[in-house]
Image (cartoon, rainbow, N blue to C red):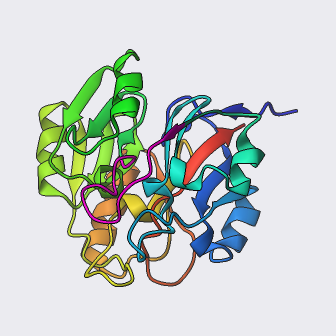
Amino acid sequence: MFQIKNIDNPNCPTGTVTQVLIGETYRNLFNSFFENKQIEPIYVPDNPSVDESLKGHVDLSVFHAGNEALFISRSIKNADFVTKINNNCDISYVFGQKSTYPEDCNLNIAYNGSYLIFNIKTADKDIVSYLTKLDIANTVHVKQGYTKCSVCFVDDKSIITGDPGIAKACRNKGMDVLLIDDSFIKLDHFNKGFIGGSSFKPSQNELAFTGTIPDHKARNEIEEFLENKKIKAVYMREQTIIDVGGIIPITMK
């Protein structure tokens, strides 16, 4: 019998994911994928404190710091999903955001247990204080406030990003980085989406994307980069890839 446990390295599970957090806005889009992977999606409600177009993005409402540590926007404190995960998680609440950038992205921090990538000017101070007490090998300061949106973790020391500033900063800290043109990612009401908001790892050796990648150059670059890491690209549906504000794995077997 498999043992279900909390994921210790956020965004980089070492087992097979069993539960994820995803925005309620995207309910039913990935049912077949979740069923086939035996993953339980836990739907996070819209956050009234962020922009109307982004209120369904879970990476603006929740930050997983590893194991049981979960930080949640106070704006959705009384949501039903909190009760559902309360037995497995040690939940802390941070102040609600304001609706415009950069005040809306205080939980949008990229962390995988080995690397902490964030904008010190926008990241929530309580979360930063918590993280600085951990034994984190590498801290990367960047100018992009939508840090997690822009970072797709491949493994404990590799990422894919469409942000040149993040790419440079991470390479300077020893990370293996694939910099792509991510203008093919769709996000309603915006010119483009972000690669971090349209991907997640359902297992140690897989990286899932929220749809197919129509740009053949980018798709070939991504699949070759992943193949070199012995990681398989998985496409959650046949439609074009979209930015859903990330999918956060929280438990695995």
User: What percent of the width, then of the height, locates residue 184?
Assistant: 30, 79
Name the dominant secondary structure of the magenta segment.
loop
Residue 239 place in picture, x, y as percent? 51, 84
Query: Observer-nearest residue: 63 or 177?
Result: 63
Q: Residue at x 14, y 48 (%)?
A: 143
Q: Is residue 34 left or right of residue 145?
A: right
Q: Which residues are magenta?
A: 93-108
Q: Position of residue 65 (x, y in %)?
A: 48, 33
Q: Is residue 20 above or below residue 235?
A: above
* The one of 169 and 190 positioned closer to us in this rendering: 190
Q: Is residue 202 visible?
A: no
Q: Residue, x 33% and y 53% (percent of image)? A: 105
- Figure quadrant of residue 230: top left
Q: Is residue 236 left or right of residue 153?
A: right
- Choose between 112 and 146: the one closer to the eye: 146
Identity of the residue drawn at 59% across and 73% down: 26
